[in-house]
């Protein structure tokens, strides 16, 4: 079974600075998807960024980018120019691409605080 | 935003009572999931469905059952609620292929006293 590990339960960053959240995963598959979700205090789960394992290029969405290291099974999220609205729980998630009905597997999350 | 509605949004119930949570989608997505979120555990899969009347267990399925009699509705039932089932419950939906991400409902906070 696949597992996802987020080793940083809590992180903090100064406003306008850059922060990197870590995620590692364990799988024997070669084709899969990786995701970062954001959960603000409203509790809503919001997709931040997605990476297909077959793509070597790291995904980028505005101030959010990932460092995808397939051989190392690492998928870190970098937030640039941090804003107060970035304060939230961040979850890393894995989904196999081998079958359409495989659910997402989540890490335990990293709580990010942004200091003004 | 994906059309997913969970009901109720909040519920307090007594130990030993049955509880049913409802997830309703308007996206016609094939796959539906129930997760629970607890501090220090992230989101853990309870049950999921890959079609009408087709369901399977997740990693924390004990004490829960599900039913899906039509595409748009996925019900989660706690047959006899226990305090350990106090949690926030999320429903999610996804398409089979393509984008592959899951879209989440707003969550249901369930307290068992």
Image (spheres, grey):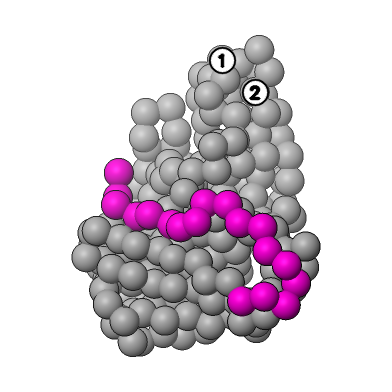
Chain of the residue on which disc 1 is drawn: A
Observer-side mark, 1 or 2, equals 2
How far apart are the alpha carbons under marks 1 and 2? 9 Å
- Vertical arrangement, residue A45 with respect to residue B36, above or below: above
Identified at 35% across, 87% down, the residue is: B54
Residue A16: numbered disc: 1
Of mark 1 and mark 2, the one earlier in the sequence is: 1
Looking at the image, can residue B79 be seen?
yes
Residue B25 percent coordinates (x, y): 30, 61
Q: Residue furthest top?
A: A116
Q: Is residue B100 left or right of residue A90?
A: left
Residue B19 percent coordinates (x, y): 58, 71
Q: Is residue A6 left or right of residue B107?
A: right
- Vertical arrangement, residue A9 with respect to residue A87, above or below: below
Identified at 72% across, 77% down, the residue is: B16
Residue A31 percent coordinates (x, y): 37, 70
Q: Which residues are magenta?
A: B1-18
Q: Which residue is mark 2?
A: A114
Residue A43: numbered disc: none
What kind of element bears circle 2? strand
């Amino acid at each position: 079974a696949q597992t996802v590990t987020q080793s940083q339960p809590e992180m903090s960053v100064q406003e306008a600075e850059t922060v990197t959240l870590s995620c590692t995963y364990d799988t024997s598959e070669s084709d899969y998807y990786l995701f970062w979700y954001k959960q603000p205090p409203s509790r809503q789960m919001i997709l931040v960024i997605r990476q297909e394992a077959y793509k070597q290029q790291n995904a980028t969405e505005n101030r959010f980018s990932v460092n995808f290291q397939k051989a190392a099974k690492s998928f870190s999220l970098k937030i640039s120019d941090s804003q107060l609205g970035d304060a939230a729980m961040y979850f890393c998630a894995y989904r196999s691409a081998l079958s359409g009905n495989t659910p997402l597997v989540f890490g335990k999350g990293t709580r990010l605080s942004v200091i003004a | 935003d994906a059309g997913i509605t969970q009901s109720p949004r909040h519920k307090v119930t007594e130990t030993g009572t049955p509880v049913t949570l409802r997830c309703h989608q308007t996206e016609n997505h094939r796959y539906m999931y129930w997760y629970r979120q607890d501090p220090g555990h992230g989101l853990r899969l309870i049950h999921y469905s890959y079609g009408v009347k087709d369901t399977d267990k997740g990693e924390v399925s004990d004490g829960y059952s599900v039913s899906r009699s039509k595409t748009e509705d996925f019900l989660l039932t706690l047959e006899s609620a226990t305090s350990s089932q106090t949690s926030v419950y999320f429903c999610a939906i996804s398409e089979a292929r393509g984008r592959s991400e899951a879209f989440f409902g707003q969550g249901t906070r369930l307290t068992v006293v």
